């Protein structure tokens, strides 16, 4: 597949022009023209790039790429080593941040909801990135946290007193702890995201709405994998999802 054809397809599929993001979405580092093997992963770390190259990838596709707003401009140290590896091996780097969070089928929130068995029926928060769903039956906070832990393969941090039965769930993957107040206002009984901040503890206790931090990486593994599988099924590309462990 031609690189330009893939770039145009991805930008259209994920509607990148709709988003004012913290980083450029799309092709971040140009490599070879012909693409047959794509490796996907959450973040374009050096370890990820090395595994992708060992597999023989022509392009890598990630959720967390490079060139973030307010990052230092000089190409030195860690940035130099990553870019040198990409350029020396003519390896394309595609990255999609908010557009991947948002996609109604392949996005991080959609994919996490599907794995948890939640059917989203409303949105909330900035750019409507947060999702809401009604559980089939009320559950305890203990039961809910156990289900999240079993699905994601890690025990979430749980804030809340656990007295209230949970029926209405809100979620937004990654570092969306700042959406907690919006989830409360939207009528959630429990909010699930990846990270936690100090004020979330007090907000959970005072509002009666439970808060779960299940890991930035852990909650965002599924969208990029689904996108790679979609490209493989649509264009016959070889695809490998590489999961570099990250406890955060």
Image (cartoon, helix red, strand yellow):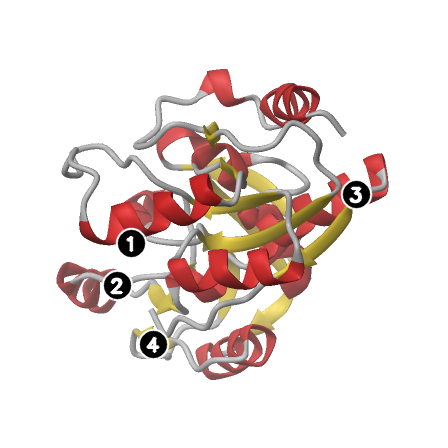
State the CA–CA distance, disc 3 to disc 4.
38 Å
Residue 238 in the image: x percent, y percent? 78, 49
Q: Earlier in the sequence, mark 3 or mark 2?
A: 2
State the CA–CA distance, disc 1 to disc 3.
36 Å
Q: Which residue is mark 1?
A: 177
Label placed on residue 67 = none
Determine which quarter of the picture holds residue 14: top right
- Nearest to viewer (mark 3 / mark 2): 3
Label 1 element class: helix
- Nearest to viewer (mark 1 / mark 3): 3
Label 2 element class: loop
Residue 123 in the image: x percent, y percent? 50, 37
Q: Is residue 204 left or right of residue 186?
A: left
Label placed on residue 237 = 3
Label placed on residue 196 = 2
Q: Is residue 16 above or below residue 88?
A: above
Residue 6 in the image: x percent, y percent? 68, 27
State the CA–CA distance, disc 3 to disc 2.
37 Å
At horizontal 66% and vertical 55% (from top left) the residue drawn is: 56
Q: Is residue 83 left or right of residue 150?
A: left
Question: In the image shown, does 94 or 104 lie closer to the viewer?
Answer: 94
At horizontal 27% and vertical 36% (from top left) the residue drawn is: 68
Q: Which residue is mark 4?
A: 157
């Amino acid at each position: 597949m031609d690189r330009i054809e893939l770039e145009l397809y991805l930008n259209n599929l994920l509607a990148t022009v709709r988003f004012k993001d913290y980083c450029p979405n799309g092709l971040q580092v140009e490599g070879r023209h012909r693409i047959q093997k794509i490796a996907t992963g959450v973040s374009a770390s050096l370890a990820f790039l090395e595994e992708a190259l060992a597999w023989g990838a022509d392009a890598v596709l990630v959720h967390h790429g490079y060139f973030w707003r307010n990052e230092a401009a000089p190409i030195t140290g860690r940035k130099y080593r990553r870019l040198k590896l990409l350029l020396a091996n003519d390896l394309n780097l595609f990255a999609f941040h908010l557009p991947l969070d948002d996609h109604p089928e392949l996005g991080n929130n959609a994919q996490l909801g599907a794995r948890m068995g939640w059917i989203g029926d409303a949105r909330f928060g900035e750019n409507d990135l947060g999702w809401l769903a009604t559980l089939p039956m009320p559950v305890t906070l203990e039961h809910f946290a156990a289900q999240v832990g079993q699905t994601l393969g890690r025990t979430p941090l749980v804030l809340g007193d656990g007295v209230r039965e949970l029926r209405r769930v809100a979620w937004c993957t990654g570092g969306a702890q700042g959406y907690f107040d919006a989830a409360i206002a939207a009528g959630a009984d429990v909010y699930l995201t990846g990270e936690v901040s100090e004020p979330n503890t007090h907000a959970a206790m005072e509002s009666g709405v439970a808060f779960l931090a299940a890991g930035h990486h852990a909650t965002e593994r599924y969208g990029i994998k689904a996108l790679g599988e979609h490209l493989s099924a649509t264009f016959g590309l070889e695809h490998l999802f590489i999961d570099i462990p990250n406890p955060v």
